[in-house]
Amino acid sequence: MGEEFPFDINPMYEGERIRKKGMYVELGGPDQPGFELVRAASMDEVEDGRFTMIGPDILDLKEGSQNTYAMMFRMAGELVETDLESVVERRMHDFQNYIQGYMHLNQRYDIWVRVSKDAVKKGLKSFEQIAKATIRLYKAELPFIEKMEATFITDPDEVKKQLDGAMEIFAQRDARTRDLHDEDVDLFYGCTLCQSFAPTNVCVVTPDRVSLCGAINWFDGRAAANVDPEGPNFAIEKGECIDEIGGEYTGVNEKTVELSGGEYDRIQLHSFFDAPHTSCGCFEVIGFYMPEVDGIGWVDRDYTEPSPNGLAFSTMAGNTGGGKQSIGFLGIGVEYFRSPKFIQKDGGWNRVVWMPSRLKERVKDGIPADISDKISTENDTKTIDELKEFLKAKDHPVVKNWIEEVEEAEEEAAAVSTAGGMGMPMQMQQFAPGQIMMPAMGGGSGGGIKIILKNAKITISEVKFEEAEGSKKKGK
Ligand code: ZN
């Protein structure tokens, strides 16, 4: 297979990382717009293997530069339908990572690509070689694709123009499931695409819960499972509903045992604390519990500043991902914010206290009007203390929980000090060490608090690790 390409093509390169000093060029990523898009077309519209380049090709780009990037593919075949676009597009990440010297991260409008100096040295000189290798992999792995052609763009104006159109297509795809709900269907869909790096990950896609990469909704899962039932997307019999609010089903639990290799046996689709969905690593957004305010903050990949808990997305990604059920952190796709079941087990939007302003703006149509102003952004607050003041001033629903807990703590303190007969020393003992104070201010669940404390330790090692890596963003 590799004969006519100057690079190897092999799944073993999937984990290959290209560091800044080994990179020839960067495409998309945190600093430049980039996207990938696959569209279905009719057989006579697509010329198999055709490649079009708009803008400078690899060797015409300045070494070490960061560039805008678009990869647009069109596919055709007797079985090809529009519903398959998302799942085919989602495979780009796998297939392009098989290419030695080419690193592909994320999906849709978040893609981040690096081409290595070594690859260029060995003879990679044109995006045409990348496109042709990608098309060959697609046709080999997904035989329903009979014809495929590609247009790659590096011209900044053209990328921006085409990105607008792509965003509309992504939005239309996302909107499709909004009138369909978990209770309306008998089948959910599973996805094992992320198990290559998150072996215990159990991805369950339902009408009310998009995949956490944001790229696969229930219709996409169905289309993929129909055309290739043995493939990475497959049907999950829903079974009996055990918990309507949490979204727990016997069929999903059975599949959870199987897919996680016995690591987990329950998943509540709409819960943050109780057997939450596993998080792979490609999540678009991370939810993080802040015990000091008993509320949940959300941060997306594009927001690189620290959140009020002092941690940035990239740091929290390490605590969240890997296919684990991490209580206190949860990875989600952006569209899940618009789900009527959005973390409803834990209060839904009434538990949300902070998110970056751009993300809030993006999902504002999904935020209930009565809570929207009470959710803080980086423009209002940057620390936990500021956040506390903000929530108090806005009378956010979580504030009620604090009062009850403070009262409880005071009652406890009073009871103890009465028994001990020395009021002041008890007070001091209770509030002097920070770690003792946390449980008093914490949320309802004791388990959550313990884990937050543990994370405070993990964080320190994570920061060092980030610096050593020299990379701003993580995740696939
Ligand atoms: Zn994933």
Image (cartoon, grey):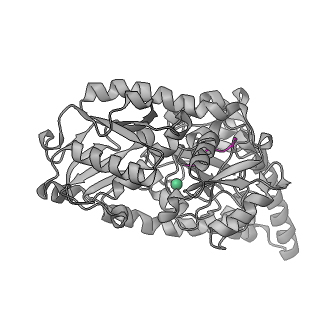
Q: Does 105 sit above or below residue 109? A: below
Percent x, y of residue 111: 38, 44
Q: Quadrant of residue 203?
A: bottom right
Percent x, y of residue 394: 68, 33
Closer to the camera in the image, 109 or 37? 37
Classify residue 264 as left or right of residue 240.
left
Q: Quadrant of the C terminus?
A: bottom left
Q: Quadrant of the N terminus?
A: bottom left
Classify residue 68 as left or right of residue 373.
left
The magenta segment: 207-212
Q: Does 339 sit above or below residue 418? A: above
Q: Residue furthest bottom?
A: 420
Magenta includes 370?
no
What secondary structure is the magenta-colored segment mainly? loop
Closer to the camera in the image, 26 or 86? 86
Percent x, y of residue 118: 16, 60
Question: Would you say residue 347 is visible in this rendering?
Answer: yes
Residue at the location (68% across, 38% down)?
Answer: 339
Classify residue 240 as left or right of residue 219.
right
Q: How many marks?
A: 0
Question: Would you say residue 434 is visible in this rendering?
Answer: no
Residue at the location (61% across, 50% down)?
Answer: 225
Residue at the location (52% across, 50% down)?
Answer: 283
Closer to the camera in the image, 433 or 296? 296
Percent x, y of residue 148: 37, 39
Q: Quadrant of residue 248?
A: bottom right
